[in-house]
Image (cartoon, helix red, strand yellow):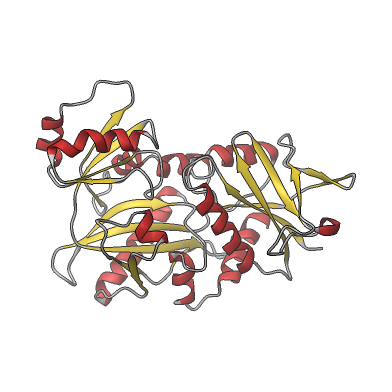
Amino acid sequence: MKKRIAIVAGGDSSEHDVSLRSAGGILSFMDREKYDCFVVEQKGHEMHVVVGENGVPYAQHDDAGMTLCPIDCNDFSYRYDGHRCTFDFAYITIHGTPGENGVLQGYFDMVGIPYSTSGVLVEALTFNKYALNNFLRSFPEIHVSDSILIRRGMERPADADIISRIGLPCFVKPNAGGSSFGVTKVKTPEALAPAIAKAMNESDEVMVERLITGTEITCGCFRRSDGQPFTFPITEVVVKNVEFFDYEAKYEGKSDEITPARIAPQTASRVSRLTRRIYDLLGCYGIIRIDYILSGEPGNEQINLLEINTTPGMTPASFIPQQVRASELHIKDVLSEIIEGRLS
């Protein structure tokens, strides 16, 4: 019998709708000969599964025959036509809380459902940018930018002291959140306080980070069935008419994404090797994507880590599907390896 896969999407962050688009991408990529795939949407304390006529996976483009069945969170099951239905595996594609910070992973551990991402500790660490940077800077081969953490309700350093240490321009971003919302490139002292307030709308913690200039790249990685991490071809990101790679650049066509990246072969080799090293240092599972800035002389750049995405976007136009298409692998096989690696 086919395995029943729940593609868990939605979430409680500003990227709820983006996550649903990723779920649609994953649904289209899955090997339908092996798996029956259902989209499960989470919002707040509730989840529901989208079911088609006769209880089969819903795959239509309109609402005809669609049924929303509430998930029983006691065991991640649902009832359809009087029958209790369960899942064999959860493919998590929530961007932000609770799918990228360890909360949902802890829930699936408790109810005994295998899932597609790293475990609770890794997800919690990588979601907290400041904690992650301070952990990784202990390894001499990993370069991260200097930063200051500001918590809601606590006395923060004076703006002049922040600027004296971090400099201008700098980035202000939610510490526990994605990079699409609440991020500001601050150029003047007067803009710092409004930027912190904006980031606080997305997270109770805000990170003020020193600007690094150079070539922005991103590299995807996953653990293959032989236990070894595998890196995809690297993507170069060139923004157009925006300050940085924000929501507009990601989803409204204001960037060029070039795969493979236009970097020296020796640089690409170093980035891939570093990505695999970080993947192993953290003990990751599933697909992650690491964003970097290359600074310095071409061919001998310093590789500066920006952030790690453990549930990266998975629409057909997202980075990971682009990189898989540029590799020797097929995306349905990549997803199958991730699923079977946890089911075996």
> Which residue corresponds to the image point at 15% horizontal and 34% vertical from the top-left?
162
Q: Is residue 234 left or right of residue 170?
A: right
Percent across and percent down for residue 202 are 40, 37
Q: Position of residue 86 (x, y in %)?
A: 78, 48
Answer with the quarter of the image where residue 42 lies: top right
Q: Is residue 105 above or below residue 286?
A: above
Q: In the rendered image, which quarter contains the N terminus?
A: bottom right
Question: Residue 292 lies in what quarter of the image?
Answer: bottom left
- Left of 61 or right of it: where is 116? left
Q: Residue at x 39, y 38 (%)?
A: 176
Look at the picture and state if 170 lies above or below 218: above
Q: Nearer the viewer, residue 11 or 149?
A: 11
Does the image show residue 277? no
Q: Nearer the viewer, residue 160 or 86?
A: 160
Q: Is residue 321 above or below residue 16?
A: below
Question: Front-most of 188 and 334?
Answer: 188
**Residue 99 pos. (x, y %):** 54, 44
